[in-house]
Image: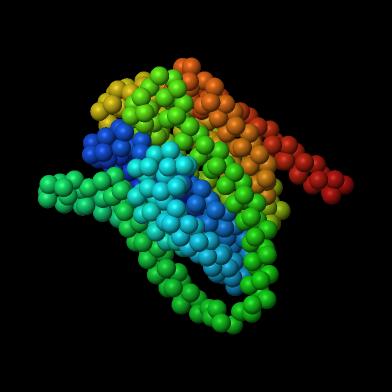
Amino acid sequence: MLKKYPFLSGTLLLTLTGVISRIIGFFYRIYLSHHIGEEGMGIYQLLAPVMALSFSLTCAGIQTSISKYTASYIAQKQEKSALRILMTGFTLSLFLSIGTACFLYQNAIWVASALLTESRCAPLVRIYSLSLPFACIHSCINGYYYGMKKSMLPSMSQLVEQLARVGSVFAIYSYGNYMGTPPSIAVTMLGILIGEICATTLSLGALYFHLSRRNTSPARRTSTSYLQHLSELLHMAVPLAANRLTLNFLQSVEAVQIPNRLVLSGMSKSSALANYGVLTGMTYPLILFPSAVTSSVSVLLLPYISEAGANGDTAKIKSAIRKSVLACLLLGSFFCILFLFFGPFLGEFLFGSQLAGTYIQILSIACPLLYLGGILTSILHGLGKALQAFFLNASCLLVRLGFVFFLIPKVGMTGYLLGIFVSELCLIVLMSAELTRHLRDVSCKLRSRKI
């Protein structure tokens, strides 16, 4: 039955590995919180903007484009074209990632001091820059496999990356403590580098095995074919990358400004970083834990909807949207109730932090909205509405930034938590309206053709 329904089997596999990875990540977060403290978690989380921006620039749009075009070509029985798309995106992404890595490594002090406003982030930036080319390589390969509806490799690479990252950090910290010289926070970035190397090794090995079994010779393909596919890839990847860069830039401004605005509310710099670390390093991972399911659905929805659109199967598209949205709302409602009643207990039990429990309880009401946003975004991308999805996400991020700049200095972190709920509610309403309008237009066109 799983072979007959590849979307279902792929979702189950990605969900299983996602849940396992999240569980490992939970223990990892707990371990880090005990070793580097709340302020250390804040410093570690400050690097998230750099990671998001660099990945968006070098790979995010390319991976999505590879997945979409691979699905379309496979649906049309053009496997060689699908492979050309992979090789073209692979080369482009590798070129961009090496250039970005060199820039980050050479300008790590400036990035840490000027952009992140925390000089202690400089060693973390340097180590992370080394992992960027590896991340791009296995992300492109994952995009190719998603497009073929083969989620085994992406699932395994995700799990291997997580195990290698957590295992290496645990080993280094254990050895350092045994020798009486506890390692610095920079070891967390070293774990990311080791994890990416392991995941890339697995992905390249699987791709080599896949190509050898299909007996496909890249040497037979002409440069003209690759140039044509490069143009095709850039047509979708450039707008996606620009959209992701803009969104991640806004998120980066948000991440950097939250501690700064907390200082304006009366907190010390250390206390502001600690509060930021509790929210992003402890509360968010728990609140977003169920998104292991919705993320799996989102990743596989894009090629599924894209293929259905290429075949003109609107009934299939509507059915996929209806079922995925309903399942997401049910999941979100369940965890909303769970976190609302047990948030304080979970914060104290898992992280030994009363503040984390308070944040979990407050954010619980946003669970259905947080989980549904990724689903609707993926659906819009699959329908070719990437530009609309970008504008909607950017608008709602600007709403949240308004809460960061104007409300946090007055009421503290509560202002930001309120901003999360309001912005996510706006996003869901606007995306639902856009999807309704698009499906209505498609139905009208089909009726006019029949007439």
Residue 276: give x, y in percent of width and height.
39, 31
The answer to whether residue 359 is above or below residue 325 is: above
The reply, left or right, for residue 3 in relation to residue 398 is left
Q: Residue furthest left?
A: 179
Residue 179: give x, y in percent of width and height.
12, 50
What residue do we see at 48% from left, 20% from top? Answer: 409
Residue 7: give x, y in percent of width and height.
52, 52
What residue do we see at 69% from left, 36% from top? Answer: 434
Residue 179 visible to an observer of this rendering: yes
Residue 315: give x, y in percent of width and height.
67, 46
Residue 286 or residue 38, whichever sits in front? 38
Q: Quadrant of residue 402?
A: top right
Q: Residue furthest top?
A: 410
Residue 318 visible to an observer of this rendering: no
Q: Residue furthest bottom?
A: 220
The answer to whether residue 432 is above or below residue 125 is: above
Residue 411 or residue 117, whichever sits in front? 117
What residue do we see at 42% from left, 51% from top? Answer: 108
The answer to whether residue 376 is above or below residue 352 is: below
The answer to whether residue 230 is above or below residue 105 is: below
Indicate how the structure is coloured in the image: rainbow
What residue do we see at 45% from left, 47% from top? Answer: 111
Q: Quadrant of residue 161?
A: bottom left
The reply, left or right, for residue 202 in relation to residue 380 is left
